[in-house]
Image (spheres, rainbow, N blue to C red):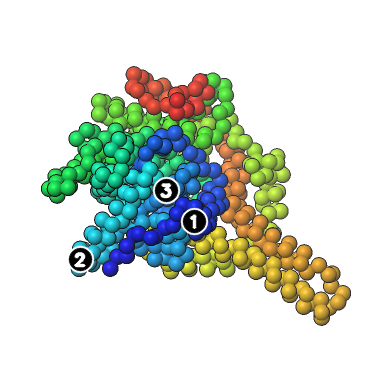
Amino acid sequence: MPESPHGSGGASDSRPYRVAAALMRLLIRVFFRRVEVDGLENVPVDRGGLLVAWHPNGLVDPALIMTRLPDRVVFGARHGLLRIPVLGAIMRALGTVPIYRASDHPAAEERSRRAANRASLDALAEKIVEGKLSALFPEGESHDAPHLMELKSGAARLYYAARRIQASGDWPLDLPGPAILPVGLHYDRKHAFRSRALVQFHPPLAIPPGLDVSPEPDEPIEAFLDRARRLTGVIERGLEAAVLPTETWEIHGLMHRARKLVRAERAARAGTDPGRPRLLERQVGFSRVWTGYRALLASDAVAVERLVDRVREYEADLRALDIEDHELDRDPRLGSAMLPLILAGQVVMVYVLLPPILVVGLLVNLPPAWLTSVLARRFAKAAKDEASLKVLIGVVLFPLTWIGVAAAITLGLVRLQGWFPALPSAPLVAGVSVAALGAAGGIMALRYRRLSAETARAVRVRRTRRRRASEVDRLRTERSDLCDRILALAEGLDLPGRVAPDGTVSTQ
């Protein structure tokens, strides 16, 4: 029998909530190198609202949303997540309301499941009417597709539950209706440690007059379901504008390639180096390509397909040379944020000096890494939850391991000094040093592969630009022609964002 959602979370200033929220902020800060936020001005301050987001990255998605908002947001989540040890306690402390999916319950429990879901929606609706924010993922589950999955009607039913409570007579009649805000979640490399993320809060949806109503108490169920279905369609179109879906990951990648080649060509013509784009700029640039592609596909599909084929060939040539658009004009920058040295010094550091530290890091961190994987597999109710659980378990288990290593070495050296008095008397320093090396080595190990690849790439691209200069020149010419054709096709279209002379784009 599904449990009641009420009582699943305390007041927003309760100690359990503060502790759980602080832990979520710590997890996000540790896992991501940078989290960008756009559109906070769209979040209403004069009324409650419902946040609707797509679900590309498991438990990380709600954590990103809640940690970017100044006020508390109450989530509806798959009830099985609340039964996972530790994770369930954190979610309950955050006030998460369980949602019961038909696929998780036998047919015999259908009546009780529906009743529990009605209670869950009412609990979330009350928060909205009180002026707070609730959030749902209308797709119902996380996925790896580049487009939306079929939306469930829960978000629409939650909206009408809030309108029904507003009309019950216990609230001011002039209280504005709840806002429905689509949220875009975009990741640089969503499963990679220390990657980047972008959270975009889009403007509230314009609800058509025929759907912006309060349900009548005696309304036929068929009429209510039809209205909920139509409102779900409005929400789906709003989410599509936030997600910018594509049919396949190949088309998604080609659109990003078009974005990058136009940016690189504009920068080359302006004689500037705009540097690596922030995620917000990447997303605005992608939205320009996506909007133009969709508009032109409807009016001149043949021309668009020809251009896509050329971009596909250009992409294949770049990959064959293992080079990026902007690298056709200049060598990649030497060094990195971690090792700002000249190339020779960087090679020595990466391939000679770091490995001994990495060995200590691996010896110290392999046992907790193995245990983290085992526990994540054991308690994850679905494969897509494993990555999120690894972060949650690891942020506790790894520091405990480092403390344990420091204590074990300190106590071990104290005992050895009893047997061999001639040993230097600094057991605490030795224990803390080894633990610090273990922690540093573990962190470096996570970055070492990427850092090593970047160093090798810096050498390889320089060699390619010199040994295969004719191929580079040919691709530079092809990039210029592709840029002109893309801009010509886009002429006259109302595209989002603003383009600067150096090729960068902004939201204004």
Residue type marked 3: Val
Q: Position of residue 333 (x, y in %)?
A: 62, 36
Which dot, 2 or 1, sits closer to the camera?
1
Residue type marked 2: Ala
Tell me how far mark 2 sits from mark 1, CA to CA: 38 Å
On screen, residue 447 above or below 335: below
Residue at the limit of the structure toward the bottom, as seen here: 419
Asked whether 365 or 43 is in front, the reply is: 43
Q: Are marks 3 and 1 in contact (CB under 8 Å)?
A: no
Residue annotated with mark 1: 14
On screen, residue 26 above or below 482: below
* Callout 3: SS: strand
Residue 73: image tag: 3
Q: Residue at x 46, y 44 (%)?
A: 71
N-terminal of the two: label 3 or label 1?
Answer: 1
Residue annotated with mark 2: 107
Q: Residue at x 84, y 72 (%)?
A: 423
N-terminal of the two: label 2 or label 3?
Answer: 3
Q: Residues within 10 Å of mark 2 (few under 14, many from 20)?
A: few
* Callout 1: SS: loop
Which dot, 2 or 3, sits closer to the camera?
3
On screen, residue 118 above or below 46: below
Residue 429: in sight, yes or no? yes
- Number of labels in the image equals 3
Tell me how far mark 3 sits from mark 1, CA to CA: 14 Å
Tell me how far mark 2 sits from mark 3, CA to CA: 32 Å
Q: Are marks 2 and 1 in contact (CB under 8 Å)?
A: no
Residue at the limit of the structure toward the top, as seen here: 492
Quarter that holds the C terminus: top left
Q: Position of residue 400 (x, y in %)?
A: 61, 65
